[in-house]
Structures are given as structure tokens and as C-alpha cells.
Amino acid sequence: MFSYDHKIRVRYGETDKMGYVYYGFYSLYYEEARTETMRQLGLTYSELEKDGITMPVSKMNVKYIRPAMYDEVITVRTIIREQPTSRITFEYEIYNEARDLINIGTTELAFIHQSNLKPVRAPRELTDQLAQYLKEN
Amino acid sequence: MFSYDHKIRVRYGETDKMGYVYYGFYSLYYEEARTETMRQLGLTYSELEKDGITMPVSKMNVKYIRPAMYDEVITVRTIIREQPTSRITFEYEIYNEARDLINIGTTELAFIHQSNLKPVRAPRELTDQLAQYLKEN
Amino acid sequence: MFSYDHKIRVRYGETDKMGYVYYGFYSLYYEEARTETMRQLGLTYSELEKDGITMPVSKMNVKYIRPAMYDEVITVRTIIREQPTSRITFEYEIYNEARDLINIGTTELAFIHQSNLKPVRAPRELTDQLAQYLKEN
Amino acid sequence: MFSYDHKIRVRYGETDKMGYVYYGFYSLYYEEARTETMRQLGLTYSELEKDGITMPVSKMNVKYIRPAMYDEVITVRTIIREQPTSRITFEYEIYNEARDLINIGTTELAFIHQSNLKPVRAPRELTDQLAQYLKEN
């Protein structure tokens, strides 16, 4: 598997009146973390879009274990376990500053050609990079 | 089962550069829809909080079928299939103006006492109201 | 002047840990209110975009008087005092359920042609509609 | 004056269908930047809240000069020009990666005691720290 840890500091505007991060805003943390994970693999999402490929999210699952607190630096671990086809699955584990696991999630994204909205295969540069980490599969 | 349809108009700020609603902001639609669903059942979430009970989300699943468009009036159908215990599950079906099913989701929420953060049973007024719709279960 | 009142119910996700609406999310209320105001004047922003015109915000001023509360239905009054040129100014007054004035704001938006990013004059259909309300100017 | 530069990478969810950062989400950048600025001055907002002081925003002004782009690392310069009283004014200048000034803003925040909602003077530790930078005033 390939995994990458990315740190994010919780903003005030991301909390709600319960005092913790609003359940809907973890999706922004997932997005930031998978973007940085792809960058580690040599691929930026913004370049992908310039090449005419978009990656809409097709599924998301989230399990909220403990709340994330304002001003806390959380660590989002993004995990890729399988070679993408025309879809790619990212798993996320979020840890708080005390190293407690506070949130688990997955997102499935499709590779879509903007011009005709048809699925395309994951870019070769991504699968080549992943190959060295996913060999054992 | 109990079900309630609630209409929401998509804001510009809820779209992203792909041109559609950002995948993370459906959670706001789910929240608005389940709040209105509870209100239909005679219970407002804000009163519940005044009584010392909060309802943090413990799980969310989302399946994105088609995009929701800016300025479109979407219909969020919220469904309750089972009597809540110390947890309640809401299902969501979102339809666009053409009546296409564009999004399916579920959220599980816990009933928690604010003072000690312990789970409590769903309020009697909610389960009583639901009883007439869920009899057949 | 032309003025239009639009009601919005505050979402949980729009509050922050202070217990009130986050200062940054009033911009979403302004956007929703001016969209409905334009619709009253026979012009939808989404049609404008289809005609190749966008309306980026060039200035915003906000004065926060009192907090807006979760689940409250606020009334956003949008006011147009002057005929737009290649820019248009909207004023906003937000009232809570007790009819207290809780927020005042203005936004200035430009009319821009998408193809060349040049300013264009406000659409004739908008200025014609406004003419009957702004005669005295 | 005291000034501090803080870098932020633009998230996809912060853009809108115009392709740039939504005008309302600059407030989140301002918040993140002034929090880091206060931290540089030895004061964290989260500790302030634990001491019973909140800092609601009383005014915001924004001038949008050029758009901020997805995945761009913007630099938010936060400037304090005057000693706070029971209020503090932060100025912001946002620069894109090409070092163009793309956004200017100010926010005024009050120091409020949570228990009685009365204004209080800015904490001594903040004014002492600022004194060395604002001497000439």
C-alpha cells in the first residue's frame, strides 16, 4: 500500500455550535489530504484538469469516532491499497494531537474526460508510481 | 416508514470549479432536510439542545449519482425506517428538477446527554410520533 | 429604490463554536438574497451566465450588530438604490425573528464578459425593470 | 506596525463554478491568518477562550482585485497598525504565487467576556508584545 500523512490545523469556521468540527467539513480535509498524496506521487490534480481529466467523487463513507477540536493540528493519513482502474479509492485515518484515531473514511473517485464525460483509465504516471508500492498485491 | 420531502435551492458558493455542487456540501443539505423532517414529527433540534441533548453524527455514507446544478431546486427526501434507540438512521434521496435521482445517502446520529456525554434513549415524543408510521415493523 | 425581503433558515453547519453564525457565512446569505432579488426583477443569474456574463464580487462591507442563531429564520432585505452601470451595488439588512436589525452589508459586483474578461454594461432587461423603481433618482 | 505572512493552499471546495475562490471564503483565510499572527505574538485564540474571552467580528471590509486560483499557495499578510483597546483591527493583503496583490481586507474584532457579554480590554500580554512594534505611534 501507499500511505501519506498530511497535517491540517482546524479553523474556527469549520467548527459548529457543538464546539467541534462540523461533520460535513471532514470532506474538505479528505480533499486536501488526497491532493497532497497525489502530489507525493508526482501528479497534481490541477495539471490533470488542464489535461482535460476531472475526478468527481462517486462515493464517500465516514465514521466519526471522536470530535476534532478547534486549533488542533490533526494528521490525515491517506492510504491507497489498490491500483486504480477508471476509479480510485482513497482511505483516510485522522489522528488528533494525542494520536487518538478520531475519524475513518473512504472516497471513491472516477477519472472522467471533460470533453465527453466518459470514464478514462487512471493516468499511466500515477499507476507507474504506485506500482512500486503495490507490488505485493 | 416515515418520509418527508424538502426543497432546497443550490447556492453559488456550494458549487466548485467543476461547475456542480461540491461533494462535501451535500452534508449541509442532509442536515437541513433531517431538521425539517424532525420538525414535521413535532421535534425541533434546537429545543432538544435546550433540553441538554445533542445529536452528533456517528456515520455518513454518500453515493453521488449525478451532479446537482447551481440555482436548481433539489428535493431531498428523508426516510426513517426504524424506531430510533440511542441512535437514529436517516436515509436521503435527492432528486433534481427533472426528477432524476442524483444522490443517495444515510447518516446515523447518536442521542447524547451534554452534561456527561453519555448516550440516552431517543425522546419519547419522537418515538411516539414515529410509532404510527412504523407500526408494520 | 427597489427592495426585496427573502427569508433564510440558519443551518447548524453555518454556526461556529461561539454558538452563532460564523462571520464568513453571511456572504452566502447575501448571495442567496441578491439572487432572489434579481429573479424578482425578471433576471436569473444562471441565465446571465449562459449568455456569457459573470458577476464577480469586487467589494464587500459587513457590519455585525447582533448574532444570528441556529434554526432561526432570518429576513434578508436586499436594496438597490442606483441604476447599475458596469457595476451594481446591493445593500443588505438582516433582521432576526424578533425583528431586530442584526447585520448590515453591501456588495459591489461587476458585469464581465466571460470570453474576454472585459466589463460590460448591465443587461437592458435589468435596467428597464429597475427604471420604474428608481425614477426619482 | 506588526506584520506576519502566512501561506495557505487553496482547496477545491473553496472554489465556485466561476473557477476561482468563492468571495465568501476569503473570511476563512483571514481567520486562519490572524490566528497565526496572534500566535506569533504569544497569544492563542483557543487559550483566550479558555480564559473566558471571545473575539466576535464586528466589521469586515473586502476588496477583490484578482481571483485566487485552485491549488495556488497564497500569502496572507496580516498587519496590526494600532494598539487594541476593547477592539482590534487586522488588515490583510493577499498575494498570489506571482506576487500580485489580489485581495485587501480589514476585520475589526471586539474582546468580549463570555460570562456577561461585556467588552473587556485587550489582554495585557498582547498589548505588551505589540508595544515594541508600535512604539513609533
Image: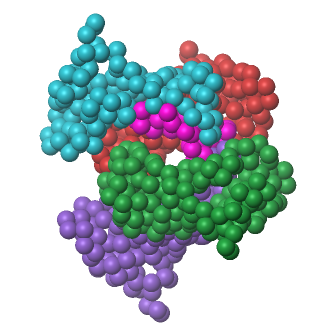
Chain colours: A red, B cyan, C green, D purple
Residue A76 falls in image quadrant: top left
Q: Is residue A118 visible?
A: yes
Give residue C121's position: percent from left, percent from top. Answer: 80, 62
Q: Is residue D56 above or below residue D137?
A: above
Relative to D31, residue B14 above or below: above
Which residue is outermost to the right?
A: C116
Q: Position of residue D120 (x, y in %)?
A: 27, 76
Say which of A79 and D13 sits in front.
D13
Residue D44 visible in the shown view: no
Q: Check the picture and name the quadrant holding the N terminus of chain B.
A: top left
| Residue at x 68%, y 57% (from the top left corner) | C56
* Quadrant holding the C terminus of chain B: top left
Q: Residue at x 56, y 16 (%)?
A: A136
Q: Position of residue B133 (x, y in %)?
A: 29, 15
> Which residue in the rendered view is the most extreme toward the top?
B136
Residue shown at 17% from the left, 42% from the top: B51
